[in-house]
Amino acid sequence: MSLFPRKSSNRQRGAALVVGLIFLALVSMIATVGMRQSITQERMAGGLRQESLARSGAETGARAGERSLFDFFASSNGVARGVGGVGDAVMRSNQAAAVDFREAPLDEFFTTGATAVDAAMVDLVGGAPATAALAEQPVFIVEELGVVRPPEAPAASEGGATGSANYEGSGGVSPAGNADLYLYRITARATGGIDTVVRTVETTFVARKK
């Protein structure tokens, strides 16, 4: 007969079960927290990507507005570009439509009165890779803000009239005052890959009127 009492094996099994359950609960908790953090980080990365796409699209719209001003001057042959005038489907001069476009809610893809970027030049909806396509083609609006001329500058100075025989486009000779420089404000808006992400870019551009 043994002098030492035998330990209960049932008690040992019970302790091991409790310890195992505690470790299982801790591992499950750590896994759940890690999964939630991964989901949050993925959403944050997705949001930043959508914002970057929208910003790039708006910048493209701004460049398209600048190009519309430059291209008109390059081919105008001395014809002045007026507000709502010849060759001017996108020009505005502090009109209500321009104000509405500039002051539209930041999360709304407001397109009233604006011009879409020519898809033949750059198609950001159907022509872009699927991972970089925008929900809508970027749009822009151009406003004429007036003549750029230094204070007290005479008409013949830089920014004023430079004569009557200056070359413009392919026509050769233009009327006096052809070198007047005008300031234009371009406001562009674009979506990201989803239309709930919208970014607006505003820039100014100096160009000739004719």
Image: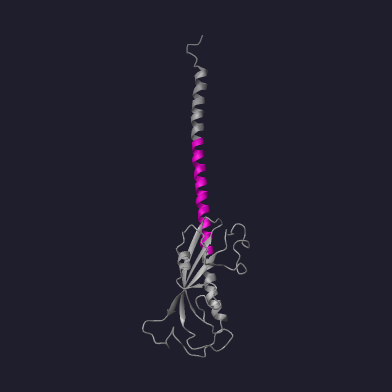
Q: Which residue does the image show at 48% across and 34% down from the upper left?
A: 26
Q: Position of residue 160 (x, y in %)?
A: 44, 85
- Residue name at image x 46 percent, y 78 percent: 182
Q: Residue at x 53, y 56 (%)?
A: 50
Instruction: Tell me if residue 169 comes above or below residue 198 in the rendering.
Output: below
Marker count (numbered): 0
Magenta: main secondary structure = helix
Q: Quadrant of residue 158?
A: bottom left
Q: Position of residue 89 (x, y in %)?
A: 55, 73
Q: Nearer the viewer, residue 55 or 141?
A: 141
Q: How is the image coloured?
A: one colour
* Residue farthest toward the left in the current orientation of the protein: 152
Name the residue nearer the viewer: 32 or 18: 32
User: Which residue is drawn at the image coordinates 46% and 83% (left, top)?
Assistant: 180
- Stretch in magenta: 28-57
Q: Is residue 42 magenta?
A: yes
Looking at this rendering, what residue extends furthest in the top direction?
1
Residue 8 against residue 67 in the figure, above or below = above
The spot of residue 12 in percent (x, y) is 50, 21
- Residue 108 in magenta stretch: no
Give the camera-side residue of 129 and 12: 129
Residue 205, percent from left and from top: 47, 74
